[in-house]
Amino acid sequence: GEPSSGPWQQPPNPDPQARWPGSEAYGTDSGSGPNFGPGFGPDAGRPIGPGAETPTRPPPIDRAAASNLARRLVLDFQFEGRMARDDYWKMFAWRAGIVLIAFALAAGGGGEMGEGPGVIGLLAALLALVVGLSGIAEACRRLHDTGKPGMWNFLLLIPYIGWAGLIYLLAQPGEPGANPYGPPPGGAPGR
């Protein structure tokens, strides 16, 4: 038969109202055994600790903002006009995250060992290409805001140092008034 006690078993609790030693650090328990916090035991899912409240639903997603972001990431191939500095760097951060995720998916592939990248890998690579090309269009507009032509994007073709020069140009404040590429975006100087 089964042994009634051993190093792997808790001794029986003679008082059902008594708490197991140390259980107060993890919240309340029914006295039936140790409580290991939310997700385990009789208090699974309940908030623990002083002043704990039941979690509320996350705020609703602003569908118009999400749609605008998706449009700008994938379908924004406009090379004319100007783009404010803060808008450019916000979109740059989104693009970098999406491209990193796409490259991770492409590297994982989704195909069997030795069969090539698979459908997921090819779709991820295509997404990275589209998002990257629309990023070049936004970089052109950002350069236009500083008064420089979009051809400065070709600095990226200079090995090892070209990216540093381009980042320097993209980080410069925009021209306060109208320039040959159009009126200032948003109307605020020094963006």
Image (tube, rainbow, N blue to C red):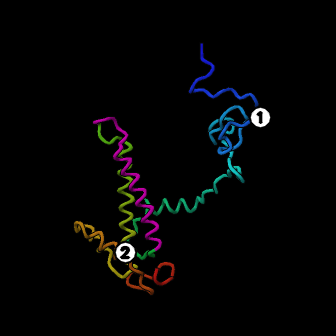
Q: Amino acid at mark 1?
A: Gln
Pointer 1: what residue? 17
* Quadrant assignment, res 2: top right
Which tag is nearer the camera, tag 2 or tag 1? 1
The percent position of residue 167, horizontal first and vertical second, equals 34, 72
How far apart marks 2 and 1 lie (CA) works out to 67 Å
Residue drawn 22% across and 68% down?
158
39 versus 93 height, above or below = above
Residue drawn 72% across and 34% down?
31
Q: Residues within 10 Å of mark 2 (few under 14, many from 20)?
A: many
The majority secondary structure of the magenta stretch comes to helix
Q: Which region shows up in magenta? A: 86-114
Residue 97 lies within the magenta run: yes
89 versus 185 height, above or below = above
Asked which secondary structure carries label 1, the reply is loop
Pointer 2: what residue? 170
Q: Amino acid at mark 2?
A: Leu
Quarter of the picture holding the N terminus: top right
Residue drawn 39% across and 51% down?
102
